[in-house]
Image (cartoon, rainbow, N blue to C red):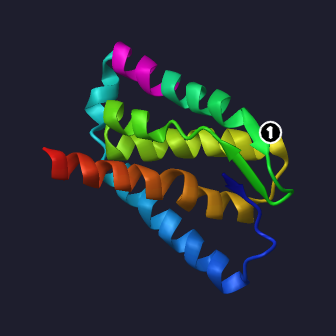
C-alpha cells in the first residue's frame, strides 16, 4: 500500500522522517559489509533490490490515495537479514518514488509503512521462532 503525504500533518511527517532516518542509520551501522565483498552476495543484494522495484510497480488502485501492491520485504528479510533488507527496501522505494513522480514526503511515510515496519516485524517474529 502506497500512501500519499497530503492527509498527514507536518509534525507527523517530521516524526516519520526521524524514525525512518534512525532506521536507515541503524541499518548502515549494523550491516555486515564484508558479506557483500563476495560477488554472489552482492548480486543477491542488488537482485533483490531490482525484484522489489518490479514487484512494487505492480499495483491495483483502490482509491486515489491508497494503492496496494506486493511487499516482498518479508522474503528479503529472511534472505538478507534486517540491515540489508532495510537498505534494499530503501533503494527500491527510492526508485519507485523517482519513477512515480511522488513527493519526498510520501517517501518518508512509505519508508516506514513499506520497509521499516514489515521488516522489523519479520525480524522480531524470526527471533521469537528461533
- In the rendered image, the vertical position of residue 58 relative to residue 120, given as above or below: above
- In the rendered image, the vertical position of residue 11 relative to residue 120, given as above or below: below
- Is label 1 in a helix, a strand or a loop? helix
Q: Is residue 42 magenta?
A: yes
Q: Residues within 10 Å of mark 1 (few under 14, many from 20)?
A: few
On the image, the x and y values in percent for residue 126 come to 24, 46
| Residue at the image position 66 percent from the left and 27 percent from the top | 54
| Residue ID for mark 1 | 99
Q: Which residue, as the protein is rendered here, is positioned at the far left? A: 130
| Residue at the image position 72 percent from the left and 61 percent from the top | 106
Magenta segment range?
A: 39-46
On the image, the x and y values in percent for residue 55 come to 63, 31
Magenta stretch prevailing secondary structure: helix
On the image, the x and y values in percent for residue 73 come to 47, 40
Q: Is residue 40 magenta?
A: yes
Q: Which residue, as the protein is rendered here, is positioned at the far top? A: 40
Amino acid at each position: 500500500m502506497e500512501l500519499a503525504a497530503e492527509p498527514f500533518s507536518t509534525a507527523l511527517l517530521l516524526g516519520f522522517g526521524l524514525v525512518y532516518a534512525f532506521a536507515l542509520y541503524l541499518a548502515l551501522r549494523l550491516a555486515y559489509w564484508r558479506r557483500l565483498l563476495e560477488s554472489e552476495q552482492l548480486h543477491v543484494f542488488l537482485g533483490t533490490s531490482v525484484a522489489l522495484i518490479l514487484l512494487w510497480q505492480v499495483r491495483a488502485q483502490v482509491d486515489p490515495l491508497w494503492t496496494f501492491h506486493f511487499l516482498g520485504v518479508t522474503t528479503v528479510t529472511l534472505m538478507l537479514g534486517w540491515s540489508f533488507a532495510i537498505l534494499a527496501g530503501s533503494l527500491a522505494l527510492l526508485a519507485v518514488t523517482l519513477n512515480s513522480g511522488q513527493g519526498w514526503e510520501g517517501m518518508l511515510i512509505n519508508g516506514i509503512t513499506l520497509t521499516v515496519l514489515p521488516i522489523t516485524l519479520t525480524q522480531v517474529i524470526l527471533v521469537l521462532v528461533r
